Image: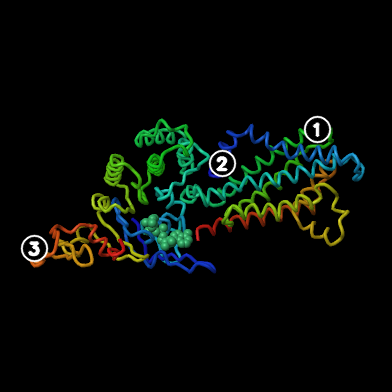
């Protein structure tokens, strides 16, 4: 536990120094989404009973926390390959999973901070979104999953270029396909089934239900927990392999 | 203290690069409190040996024991005993000098008081106290190397690994590092170092292992290594450039030198570790 805190502490020191910049830069993308899709397009769109903005906000939360937590781990790639500062952790008397969880926790913190920013902005735009503990937990779980994916990428991928490719071929399509901006129900059957395999879809479903004051969708929660476990296994295995 | 048995490390290549055996069945023991030197030309496998001994990379085959216990039994306990000064600077570039030290202290479970005290002491020792709040990027190369040494000592390791510790240091600092190494060894710390400076090995190490292309080609005291070759050396300008012959006794060497009278620049001198090193690693022609 103490070692998890040490690893987290390091990220906190770095984040604290850049907190203002971090917060400002995290406002840009959500603002654009809110303006373009909330104000712009949204006026002419009807999804379900509520306003498009209310529909949109949970989607943006899911999408944004995915991006932030994944990209929070990409610097670890440079720490492994270029700066070699990862060696400090390899020679230290700490367990490999302390390192993984410390990094994941730091990513969760970043993800939650930026989610808070989005909620604030959304309220300014007049969205009606209920924030509850289950919602925060779902967001946390979403961050954990994508932080682990980021951890896995940082440990296995050799060039920075390839990490960018994970972003382009995996995260970007998910941002658009997983029901962030529209309901997955409207997709053709084959595409819908594919999309429903992806984790982000289920984060969106859960958040949307919770934000509208509904209950927990247990099937989606199960899928996310499954991805969480898979992510942990992949991350640990990748970390084990860097000593080969 | 340390026992390595037939340590082997293979790096597996891909389509373009062939497999490479960087360390090949190397066995040795290092005694408690000893200063043990590992010498070898570039690419001989020194760093790879250190990386295996410090659990940064797994041996492809072979065993490592600390105090008779296999490292696989309790790796975290083993790691708590080790200090490592890497060949390449590996600071956290997002942290300051002080924070890098602090991170190390925390990773080695020192209390806040002890951390502060040790960091102060050590930064003072390597004369980097003024830089404590600076980003490590801003240190010069030599300052970074001094900081690496300071950092490795925070938790008072029982065994200190130094991979070319004095590269890029000015002579005064190098001497001070040597002093420090002697003092640590005197206090019971076991020292395992690699170096390219023969005089460093000669002046510091009780025993020296010579590695060549991944194989251990000699392991002895510096004195014995010279004696095994022949305690006296005659060198002269031959047809193929500078040539060398080694003799067990001075008289024999002198006789040989007389016969060579026609050749130029004949020198008769005691054999040194550099001669032994070059003979053992067979790279005289290449240099
Ligand atoms: N990660 C790696 N992947 C593939 N080959 C490697 C790797 N690390 C080292 N090698 C190879 O193993 C051999 C030994 O390298 P090593 O760094 O141990 O040598 P060294 O004795 O420390 O050399 P130097 O004096 O230059 O520091 C070299 O041929 C090197 O190319
Ligand atoms: Mg080396």
Camera-side mark, 3 or 2: 3
Q: Badge 3 sits on which subunit? A: B
Question: Disc 3 designates what residue?
Answer: B254
Camera-side mark, 1 or 2: 1
Q: Give the residue displayed 14% in from the left and 57% down from the top.
A: B269
Q: Are marks 1 and 2 in contact (CB under 8 Å)?
A: no
- Badge 1 or badge 2: first in the primary sequence: 2
Rounded to the nearest angstrom, the CA distance separating label 3 from label 1 is 96 Å
Q: Nearer the viewer, residue B175 or B119?
A: B175
Question: Disc 1 designates what residue?
Answer: A123
Q: Are marks 3 and 1 in contact (CB under 8 Å)?
A: no
Residue B187, percent across and down?
Answer: 29, 44
| Mark 1: few/some/many CA within 10 Å (<14, 14-19, 20+) | few
Q: Badge 1 sits on which subunit? A: A
Residue B139 is at least partly visible in this image? yes
Residue B46 is at least partly visible in this image? no
Residue A47, percent across and down?
Answer: 90, 45
Residue B212, percent across and down?
Answer: 33, 64
Say left or right for A226 vs A45: left
Camera-side mark, 3 or 1: 3
Q: Give the residue displayed 46% in from the left and 46% down from the top.
A: B90
Rounded to the nearest angstrom, the CA distance separating label 1 from label 2 is 33 Å
Q: Quadrant of the C terminus of chain B?
A: bottom left
Scheme of colours in the image: rainbow
Q: Quadrant of ligand 2?
A: bottom left
Q: Which mark is residue B238?
A: none
Say left or right for A224 vs B41: right
Find numbered disc 2 in the image and state the secondary structure of the residue it sits on. helix
Q: Which mark is residue A5?
A: 2
Q: Based on the displayed image, in which of its 4 quarters is residue B42 positioned? A: bottom left
Q: Based on the displayed image, in which of its 4 quarters is residue A232 positioned? A: bottom right
Q: Badge 2 sits on which subunit? A: A
């Amino acid at each position: 536990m103490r070692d998890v805190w040490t690893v987290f502490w390091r990220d906190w020191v770095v984040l604290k120094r850049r907190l203002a910049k971090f917060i400002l830069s995290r406002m840009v993308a959500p603002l654009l989404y809110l303006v373009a899709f909330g104000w712009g397009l949204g006026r002419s769109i009807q999804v379900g009973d509520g306003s498009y903005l209310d529909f949109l906000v949970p989607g943006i939360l899911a999408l944004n926390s995915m991006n932030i937590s994944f990209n929070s781990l990409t610097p670890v790639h440079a720490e492994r390959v270029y700066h070699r500062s990862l060696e400090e952790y390899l020679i230290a008397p700490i367990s490999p999973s302390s390192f993984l969880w410390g990094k994941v926790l730091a990513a969760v913190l970043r993800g939650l901070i930026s989610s808070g920013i989005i909620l604030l902005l959304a309220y300014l735009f007049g969205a009606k979104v209920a924030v509850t503990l289950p919602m925060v937990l779902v967001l946390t779980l979403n961050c954990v999953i994508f932080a682990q994916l980021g951890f896995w990428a940082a440990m296995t991928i050799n060039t920075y270029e390839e990490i960018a490719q994970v972003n382009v071929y995996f995260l970007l399509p998910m941002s658009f396909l997983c029901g962030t901006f529209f309901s997955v129900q409207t997709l053709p059957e084959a595409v819908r089934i594919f999309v429903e395999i992806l984790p982000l879809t289920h984060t969106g479903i859960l958040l949307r239900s919770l934000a509208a004051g509904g209950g927990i969708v247990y099937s989606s929660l199960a899928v996310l927990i499954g991805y969480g476990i898979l992510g942990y296994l992949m991350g640990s295995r990748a970390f084990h392999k860097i000593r080969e | 203290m340390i026992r390595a048995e037939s340590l082997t490390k293979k790096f597996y290549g891909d389509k373009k690069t062939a497999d490479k055996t960087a360390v090949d069945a190397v066995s040795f023991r290092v005694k408690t409190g000893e200063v043990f030197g590992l010498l070898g030309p570039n690419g001989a496998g020194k760093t790879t040996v250190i990386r295996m001994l410090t659990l940064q990379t797994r041996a492809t085959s072979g065993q490592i024991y600390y105090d008779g216990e296999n490292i696989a039994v309790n790796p975290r306990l083993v790691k708590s005993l080790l200090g490592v000064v890497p060949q390449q600077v590996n600071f956290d570039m997002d942290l300051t000098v002080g924070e890098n030290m602090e991170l190390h202290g925390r990773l080695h479970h020192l209390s806040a008081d002890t951390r502060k005290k040790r960091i102060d002491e050590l930064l003072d020792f390597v004369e980097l106290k003024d830089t404590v709040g600076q980003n490590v990027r801003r240190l010069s190369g030599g300052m970074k190397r001094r900081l690496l040494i300071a950092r490795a000592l925070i938790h008072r390791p029982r065994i200190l690994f130094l991979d070319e510790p004095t590269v890029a240091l000015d002579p005064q600092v190098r001497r001070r590092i040597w002093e420090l190494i002697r003092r640590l060894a005197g206090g019971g710390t076991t020292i395992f170092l690699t170096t390219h400076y023969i005089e460093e090995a000669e002046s510091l190490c009780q025993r020296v292992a010579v590695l060549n292309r991944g194989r251990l080609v000699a392991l002895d005291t510096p004195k014995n290594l010279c004696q095994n070759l022949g305690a006296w050396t005659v060198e002269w300008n031959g047809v193929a450039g500078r040539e060398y012959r080694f003799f067990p006794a001075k008289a024999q060497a002198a006789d040989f030198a007389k016969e060579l009278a026609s050749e130029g620049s004949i020198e008769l001198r005691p054999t040194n570790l550099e001669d032994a090193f070059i003979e053992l690693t067979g790279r005289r022609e290449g240099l």
